[in-house]
Amino acid sequence: MPQNLLLRQIKNVGDLIKAGLCQLAPCSCLLCAIPNRQTICPDCVQQFFSAPTDRCVRCAIPLGNADQYCGQCLKTPPAFSRTIVACDYRAPLDELILALKFRHQLAVAPALAQQLALATAASTAIPELLMPVPLSRARLVQRGFNQSLEIARPLARLIRRPLVAQLLHRVRDTTAQTLLHPDERRENILHAFSPDEATKDRIRGRHIGVVDDVITTGATLNEIAACLKRHGAVRVTNLVFARTPPH
């Protein structure tokens, strides 16, 4: 499908989704709080999502120039090939993630998915199928939903790719990555994911997109990509709404 046509379809479908939600409950823009029939108003979309940013191809960290890879990815390449993000994780955009993840405002997810779909459509290599970052059973029971899956569902519709919600399972509970020092995160998440026998055939020979809400150190996404590669994936691309900038 031509790239320009896909971009137009994403905008049209995204507008229909948001219009349907607002018919049920009139809303205000989550970023500026001005009453609007869209979750993110057009002015805020223009202000926060329109300016292109030079990023490392692999980890999406902002770069000060047009280099393809950051120093860390050149020194220690991660298992994934590319990371596509819609924005940086900074105020006021962090409020969108907080509203979804901790205030259970699930209606935010389609708006995040649309901005991520627009960023994805600009890529020359869109994954063949999508999967969300899995939550452990305990974390899923505690939260009541998987925020990555909530973003992945509308994203899959927008970019016209199949979604396999349980392509991998989290086979052991881990300490929340946000509670750990960056140096501890890789060890914490090591060998935490595995596919079922029934899903291994969906992995072999495929280009797989892994959907998440935020990327910080990339340790979780790297471990997922390594697991997928061990089971035959030829390429792994991360599709993440927000990138935490370096401190």
Image (cartoon, rainbow, N blue to C red):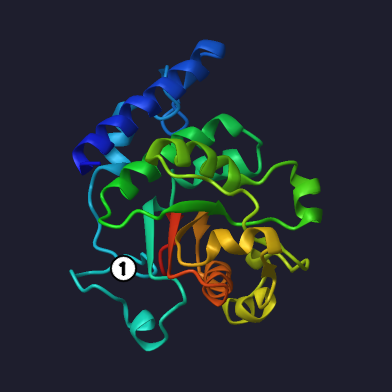
Residue 168, placed above or below residue 141: below
**Residue 155 in sight in this render:** yes
The residue at 50%/69% (across/down) is: 218
Q: Which residue is mark 1?
A: 57
Q: Amino acid at mark 1?
A: Val
**Residue 196 in sight in this render:** no
Residue 181 in which image quadrant:
bottom right
Name the secondary structure under disc 1.
Answer: loop
Residue 197: give x, y in percent of width and height: 70, 64
Residue 39, placed above or below residue 85: above
Residue 178 in which image quadrant:
bottom right
Residue 118: give x, y in percent of width and height: 32, 42
Is 170 positioned to the left or the right of 207 in the image? right
Residue 80 in which image quadrant:
bottom left
The residue at 54%/63% (across/down) is: 203
Residue 85: give x, y in percent of width and height: 38, 54
Is 181 positioned to the left or the right of 118 in the image? right
Quadrant (top left, top right, bottom left, bottom right) of the N terminus: top left
Out of 115 and 235, give the one closest to the viewer.
235
Quadrant (top left, top right, bottom left, bottom right) of the C terminus: bottom left
Is 141 positioned to the left or the right of 121 in the image? right
Looking at this view, name the residue that lies furthest to the bottom.
Answer: 75
The residue at 31%/69% (across/down) is: 56
Out of 39 and 163, give the one closest to the viewer.
163
Give the class, few, some or many, for how many residues have Cα within 10 Å of label 1's Cα (few <14, many ≥20): some
